[in-house]
Image (cartoon, rainbow, N blue to C red):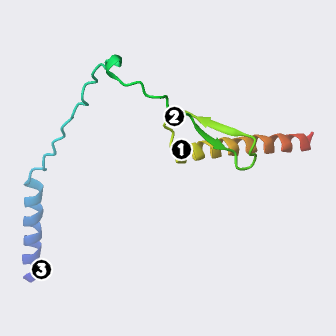
Amino acid sequence: MAAAAVAGVIFAVIAYLSVEPAPVIATVAVAAPAARPTDLRLRPNLPAAPPVKLVNPFDPSETFEFPPGTSDAEARETAAALLLERARQRMAATERDRTL
């Protein structure tokens, strides 16, 4: 008898949950503020930012140059990727030369 009562409660809960409407989730799109034209005559004459320079740690005679505003972390990561790719190409060329 207790099993029948538990089964009845479970059935009632399942029936209630299946009738309950799903919650509505609203999304709102927010437009970015419109770009305003800039009057260059009102801007002060600021010196141009210098490019970001990074010296190759393996060859101090080589310097990598990045656009102004590049973070040090981005410069290091990009230089590391370039050096790694260069090393892979050299290794592949060496392997190719050995097999000839």
- As helix, strand or loop, the secondary structure at mark 3 comes to helix
Left or right: 60, with 30 as reference point: right
Residue carrying label 2: 68
Real-space Cα distance between discs 3 and 1? Answer: 66 Å
Instruction: Choose mark 3 or mark 1, whichever is in front.
Output: 1
Q: Residue at x 37, y 25 (%)?
A: 44
Front-most of residues 56 and 27: 56
Q: Residues within 10 Å of mark 1 (few under 14, many from 20)?
A: few
Q: Which one is earlier in the sequence, the residue at label 2 or at label 1?
A: 2
Asked which quadrant contains residue 12, the reply is: bottom left
Considering only vertical position in the picture, is 26 above or below 13? above
Left or right: 69, with 94 as reference point: left
Front-most of residues 10 and 79: 79
Q: Position of residue 54 (x, y in %)?
A: 63, 43
Residue carrying label 1: 74
Q: What's under tag 1, amino acid-wise?
A: Glu
Q: Are marks 3 and 1 in contact (CB under 8 Å)?
A: no
Q: Residues within 10 Å of mark 3 (few under 14, many from 20)?
A: few
Q: Are marks 2 and 1 in contact (CB under 8 Å)?
A: no
Q: Residue at x 19, y 40 (%)?
A: 27
Real-space Cα distance between discs 2 and 1? Answer: 12 Å
